[in-house]
Image (cartoon, rainbow, N blue to C red):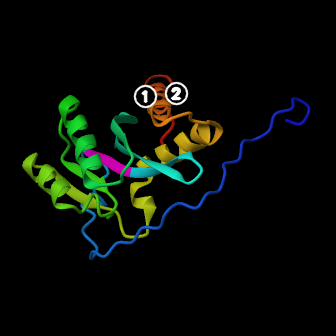
Amino acid sequence: MQEMKIHSLMHRRFKKPNTHVDYLQRPNLIKNKPKASTWRADITYLELRPGTWVYLSSVYEPKVHKILAYKIGRQMNAKLVVDTVNQALEHHKRPAYFHSDMGSQYTSCDVENLLRRHQIFHSYSKQGYPYDNSQIEGFHSLLKREFVFQTHFSSFEDLILRISNYINWFNTERIRTSV
C-alpha cells in the first residue's frame, strides 16, 4: 500500500446530541423469525456543517439489500418517520414486521397508528443494543464511511441531492455484501 501510495480513510469522530428513552422495553417480535418479511428502520445524524445537524430516516429491506425509502429533514421527529414509511408503502409490498429502535419517533402514536392501520407488527431492538438492527445500522455506517465523511456539502439542498445519488448508487450498482 505504501509503494502505491494507498491509504485508508478514517472517519472523523464527532459528538452528536444525546438521546434518552423513558419507555419500558417493547418486544422484539422478529428475534426468532429470520425469514419473516421485515423492514428495518432507523434515523442517523448527518453533519451539514460543524454544529449543524440534519437527519436521515431510512427504511431497508434485508432480503433485497436495498433502501426502500428515505427522507432527510432538519428535525428528528415522528413526522420524518411517518413520511419515510408512507413513501415505502406507496412503492413496495407491505411487510409483516417493521423493526426499529425505541427512539421517541418510533414509539410515537403517529408511527404506531400508521403501522396498525396497515396491519404491520412493530418489533423493537433492545434498548442500547444496536446489533438487533444491524442491517440498517450497517447501511448508515457505510454511507458515512464511504461518502459523508469525505464530502463537504454547500447547502441543505446539496446534501439531499448527493445523499440521494449515493443511495441510488447503493441500490443499483454497489457490489452486494450483507450489510
Q: Is residue 36 left or right of residue 65?
A: left
In the displayed structure, 11 sits above or below 1; it is: below
Q: Is any part of residue 35 visible from this angle? A: no
Q: Residue at x 20, y 39 (%)?
A: 86
The picture places residue 154, in percent across and down from the top left corner, at 56, 33
Q: Secondary structure at mark 1?
A: helix
Q: Residue at x 44, y 51 (%)?
A: 44
Contact check, label 1 and label 2, Cβ < 8 Å: yes
Q: Is any part of residue 139 visible from this angle? A: yes
Query: Chief secondary structure of the magenta span?
Result: strand
Residue ranking furthest to the right:
3
Quarter where residue 71 is shown = top left
Q: Residues within 10 Å of mark 2 (few under 14, many from 20)?
A: few
The picture places residue 124, in percent across and down from the top left corner, at 29, 62
Is 126 colored magenta in this rendering? Answer: no
Q: Amino acid at mark 1?
A: Asn
Label at residue 171? 1
Q: Amino acid at mark 2?
A: Arg
Residue ranking furthest to the top:
173
Look at the image and give the residue range highlighted in magenta: 38-42
Of 60 and 81, nearer the camera is 81
Q: Which residue is mark 2?
A: 174
Of 8 and 51, nearer the camera is 51
